[in-house]
Amino acid sequence: MRLVLYTGKGGVGKTTTAAATALRAAECGSRTLLVSADAAHSLSDVLARNIGPEVARVAPGLDAIEVDARVEIARHWGHVHDFLVSLFRHQGIEGVVAEELALIPGAEEIATLIAVDEFARSGEYDFAVVDCAPTDTTLRLLTLPDVAHGSVRLLLKLQRALARVVTPIARGLSDAPLPDSEVFREAEALVYEKLAGLRERIAAKQTSVRLVVTSERMVIDEARRAFTDLCLFGLHCDAVVVNRLLPEAAARESFFGDWAKLQEERFGEIERAFAPLATLRAELGEEEIIGCARLGEHAAKTFGATPPDAVLCEPPTIRFSKRNGRGVVEVPLPGATLDALDIAKIDDSLVIKTANAARSLALPHTLASHDVAEARLGEGVLSVYFDARPVGG
Ligand SMILES: Nc1ncnc2c1ncn2[C@@H]1O[C@H](COP(=O)(O)OP(=O)(O)OP(=O)(O)O)[C@@H](O)[C@H]1O
Ligand SMILES: [Mg+2]
């Protein structure tokens, strides 16, 4: 199943663009699902009809849902959650506070993604469009399966080891609640099946992130940082949607003339800054774009002959190679500058840090025993060179 996630700064038009894309795809014949992953759901407002946590048909070939993350959490790891709540209660933490504490950080985001993944596996849809929360949260959402997988797995190992020794003794001695096998089974399923599955889904070529921007400087800058960070995590972006561009008729009016000129300059800047992504133009409507009829018109103008569910730009990928006898890791990092990056080799991994995010890349066996020699950045690709000789060799 093709999956497209829309993100961007608050208020730029993510929900509108996501809904318009989904509607257009359904009109073009794709069985489409529109999903809200933003805790502040607003599909109901944009579609001008009530959308809830159950799938609802909104147009021929188009279903929509606002995922209720709490319900999903209860469904997937209710036992783990209940155990944590009982443990906190035992320690004297009461009611709502215990409930809140028991929410594993990022659990709501993960639960939402798991719901999307289940729809993808169901075979009922060709295309899912996800309306995400503003940039920072989306980044967290998409990088979580990667981060959580490692840390939860470690935790699980420790717990298992501990339980084998401590549980039989403690059962006899303490009245503190202890995790039973169901808790472990659920936690393991989370790590080995669900998180692993999500990592695959998110990194798949069939999954793309689209950035929605307007022509304001702050909006563009935030999207550029997001683009770099998404690339760092190997997530594929395929397009930028430039929203609220003045239509030609308005640009001819003297009052808007300068504004329209500035917008065109910025549009050129956006095309260059986000190359090789596709750039789509979305016009400012005469009024708010609410309801299927207006969304359909807006989508037709924005996409024209472009299929809304196509992969609009082939994603670059991380490459390991050899040059002049030295190992090289090439990481596509458009928009990054070398002095804003921290690069270090820690154990068998290469750690790359930007201002907002850090990723640990497992190195192939042949490079793991070599130190980093130098890093270069050119044409949006970070090349990290390794010493020709292994450490101590
Ligand atoms: N091209 C446009 N022309 C006219 N109105 C627009 C356009 N794009 C968005 N809007 C309006 O701007 C408002 C905000 O849009 P929308 O809800 O899609 O933004 P958002 O990025 O999803 O916001 P949030 O960050 O709050 O989720 C809505 O009232 C919407 O109808
Ligand atoms: Mg929104």
Image (spheres, grey):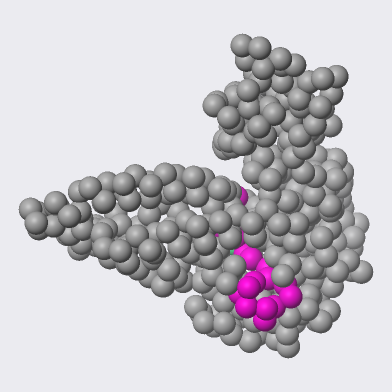
Which residue is located at x 84 percent, y 73 percent?
300
* Along the viewing direction, whichever of 120 and 378 lies nearer the viewer: 120
281 or 112: nearer the viewer: 112
Q: Residue furthest left?
A: 173
Query: Does 134 lie within the magenta span?
Result: yes
Residue 362 in sight from this viewpoint: yes
**Magenta span includes 125:** yes
Position of 260 relative to 35 (above/below): above
- Residue at x-position 26% and y-position 51%: 163
Q: In the image, which residues are magenta?
A: 119-135
Q: Is residue 24 left or right of residue 93?
A: right
Image position, residue 241 (x, y; %): 77, 56
In this image, 141 relative to 184: left or right?
A: right
Q: Quadrant of residue 42?
A: bottom right
> Which corner quadrant holds the C terminus?
top right
Quarter residue 130 falls in: bottom right
Query: x, y percentage for residue 328?
Result: 76, 27
Please provide percent x and percent y for residue 74. 38, 70
**x then y, percent, for residue 304:** 89, 68
* Residue at left offset 54%, top offset 52%: 145
Position of 184 relative to 382 (above/below): below
Tell me the quadrant of the picture where the N terminus can be found.
bottom right
Is residue 92 among what the camera can see? no
Residue drawn at x 9%, y 56% as measured from the top left = 172
Above/below status of 137 relative to 340: below
